Image (cartoon, rainbow, N blue to C red):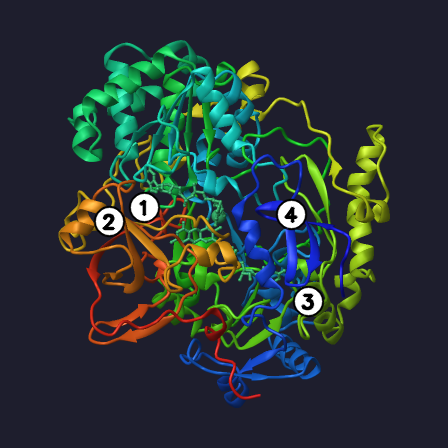
Amino acid sequence: MTIRQPLYHSSHWGAFSAIQQEDGLAIAPFPGDPDPSPILKNIPAALTHPARLSRPLIRRGWLEDGPGPDARRGSDDYVEMDWEQALELAAGELKRLGAGDPDSPAANHGRHVFGGSYGWSSAGRFHHAQSQVHRFLNMAFGGYVASVDTYSTAAGSVILDTVAGNSGRISREGCWWEHIRETTELVIAFGGLPIRNLSVSPGGSSQHIARDCIAAALKRGCHIVSVSPLRDDIGGADEITRYQPRPATDVAMMIGMAGHLLARDLVDHAYIAKYTSGWEAFRAYLEGTTDGQPKTPDWAEAICGVPASEIRALAEEAARKRTLVTVGYGLQRAENGEQPIWMGLALSAMLGGGSRKGAGFTYAIGSMGNHGKPQLSVPLPTLPQGYNKSGDFIPVARISDLLLNPGADYTYRGKTRRYADIRLVYWAGGNPFHHHQDLSRLRQAFSRPDTVIVHDSVGTATTAHADIIFPATITAERDDIGASAGDPYLMPMQRLAAPFGEARDDYDIFCDLSARLGCREAFSENRSSREWLAHLYGKTEEAMRRRGFDVPDFDGLMQGGPLPLPVSDTPSMMEAFHTDPVAKPLDTETGKILFHSELVASSGLPGHPAWIEPQEWLGGALAQTHPFQLVANQPFGRLHSQLDFGATSMAGKIDGREVARLNDADAARLGIAEGDVIRIFNARGATLAAARPSAEVLPSVVQLSTGAWYAPRDIDGTGLACVNGNPNAVTADRPASPFSQGCAGQICLVSIEKLTGDIPPAVPHEEILRKRGA
Ligand SMILES: Nc1nc2c(c(=O)[nH]1)N[C@H]1C(S)=C(S)[C@@H](COP(=O)(O)OP(=O)(O)OC[C@H]3O[C@@H](n4cnc5c(=O)[nH]c(N)nc54)[C@H](O)[C@@H]3O)O[C@H]1N2
Ligand SMILES: Nc1nc2c(c(=O)[nH]1)N[C@H]1C(S)=C(S)[C@@H](COP(=O)(O)OP(=O)(O)OC[C@H]3O[C@@H](n4cnc5c(=O)[nH]c(N)nc54)[C@H](O)[C@@H]3O)O[C@H]1N2
Ligand SMILES: [Mo]
């Protein structure tokens, strides 16, 4: 298949057009995008990279010995198989576990099947692997054990749902970027406003506006304060003030500000009375009535390291100005991750909150490209996933606990729940051996089920722990529709290339399996992919026609260009609440913003935002043994582990190995120079990275972004280490709290040493999965 006309397509990091040239696919960013992402340059490599999977693969041990728990997962090799045989094997195993007749007692509504299958997969509203696998399991078993919340935000979402009603609406609704550009006088951004992260939105991003908005706000005289251990978590301008508290201590800095506001009588009591409840309990904590410790800026300085004088000055400036407080996802991906999010909201409430335009609190505007943008007034095409009759789920980051502890009790949002007994794991569109913490423990967990089935286009570390691997196409090999909440375009995603080898669309794989299980009609509704696309687009098309827009039919959309979508002028949840808190209450215990929550208090946490000492922080006992705080944040040059072999991602590595940055004084002290290979380790494991001394990084912090493909190898004398630099070899599989059970993978304590002697090379992407004999 050769394409000569530029065709439109889309990715989570931007819309683009593509044309085929002698040396491969040439990508041009969507012309309407003011600040296209460098990640687009990763795409051409995806078409034919040697890590692509071309045929179904079956793990040798599973094939020879049959289904069952098996510690060889992760080190076994694979046998290629033709599609017919591989589909038969998978269908046979699904049937053995009850698939085929969702209403029979044997099917048990998939209670032994984990289909939570978290992951971002690719842009595209129909070929969305997670939606496809959920729909399939609902049709085949009548259900499955699902997952709730996300690795992105769980502690933050659970606490905001509880104390402010709806975390998703707080993040997405409102026009905060426009407000920052035009009216806000002080932005305090905990976690910074990293342009790197704002390249990405789930589903696509046609316009990257953050850089321009920040520049325009600064020009207008808006003061922007970035609070982060990394000075470059916000673009370059000198006018930006940067504070670098110790990681995990922002909540103390915020509480110190709050204590000062109270002491100086700078609290907006009228706002508190009208829009909040529980203030007295929090006030008692600030004054030290409950624990004998008044929460002064000096108290805060001792914990967070930011000088008390600066904490006071920032609090006073915030009280004087139209102030926006925003807290990034990164801070809540940590032990007690609820606290900085809740405290950010509480601080903004003490300042008079969101009753003025451009002031108040917004969640994670610096984390996702589609936050703080106007919402759309028409529905987006969405594949219905069917109904899950099992009703069972885990908080998403409890996957290892689920597989290792069937029948064990745990708590979530104040309730006690029980882990299912999982016999089959089905994953499509995600990479748990990228995203989960403590990968050695995840390896043990993956040895437990009878069977693991994975779809992916490439041989990731997750496929290397599967029994049956189906090779999936990539978006460039299929037609789809790109769209994202808060993005003003519907993007035709036109097929750019023929499928690689024998790869099939996830949809077609599930159709083939459904046919063998007798549920093909229910799964496919007798529609081809193209008929589904036209059907799903029809909902948006109809809604637009009803509003009087002239819209193309489906063929017209696919042949024409991006379709502008109407934006909504409905007030956001918080605007409506501030206009009339009685008529538009929040969905919380009192209808107001909570300084104190009974549910939280009854779950073993303080009932108000509080500083709770974590196990792994630079001020704690464990820092005597492991004196560095690892910050495992999002990578600049790729989305998670996706297309790690692409040009932008590879350009950021040294000899194929991920780069870790540390403060230059720390590096000098340890005799570490640019490019030296360092071993980053703790009691859970080790990972190797190429060092980069940098003045941007707070002393005692080492930053190693996520996404390098996990490749554990035995290192002489010191045991296993991931030689490619995956930080999840050392992060802790410890929930943020028993309340949210959220992922706490952003930070952990580690030691660092320079590696000498024989240094094992990085493992190329195509060697992660051992595809030996055919
Ligand atoms: N230590 C630490 N860990 C973290 C984080 C952190 O900050 N620190 N961040 C966390 C966060 S926020 C997230 S969201 C997760 C991300 O974790 P994931 O979403 O699991 O990561 P991805 O690399 O996006 O994985 C997507 C997988 O889907 C595959 N894929 C893409 N398109 C298709 C398709 O059409 N069909 C099929 N079958 N497969 C496809 C890709 O090849 C890739 O293997 O990681 C989390 N992990
Ligand atoms: N380029 C790119 N962009 C992405 C992604 C990607 O993979 N690549 N992933 C997307 C996804 S799925 C998500 S969920 C979002 C995640 O959005 P975030 O969670 O906001 O992103 P991170 O880079 O993990 O964290 C942001 C910064 O928080 C800082 N930080 C860490 N701990 C602390 C702390 O205790 N205090 C303070 N003040 N700062 C701290 C770190 O320095 C880090 O750089 O990013 C999205 N954007
Ligand atoms: Mo995420």
Residue for badge 1: 335
Which label number is shown at residue 522? none
Disc 3 under 8 Å from ligand 1? The reply is: no
The answer to which of marks 3 and 1 sits earlier in the sequence is 3
Identify which residue is drawn at 22% across, 50% down: 628
The answer to which of marks 3 and 2 sits earlier in the sequence is 3
Q: Nearer the viewer, residue 443 or 631?
A: 631
User: Which quadrant holds the N terminus?
Assistant: bottom right
Residue for badge 2: 616
The answer to which of marks 4 and 3 sits earlier in the sequence is 4
Q: How many angstroms separate mark 1 from mark 4 (CA)?
A: 42 Å
User: Which quadrant holds the C terminus?
Assistant: bottom right
Q: How many angstroms separate mark 3 from mark 2 (CA)?
A: 44 Å
Residue type highlighted by circle 3: Ala
Crowding at dot 4, Cα within 10 Å, few <14 / some 14-19 / many 20+, comes out as: some
198 lies above or below 758: above
Residue type highlighted by circle 1: Glu
191 lies above or below 532: above
The answer to which of marks 1 and 2 sits earlier in the sequence is 1
Which label number is shown at residue 140? 3
Crowding at dot 1, Cα within 10 Å, few <14 / some 14-19 / many 20+, comes out as: many
Q: How many angstroms separate mark 4 from mark 3 (CA)?
A: 41 Å
Residue for badge 4: 28
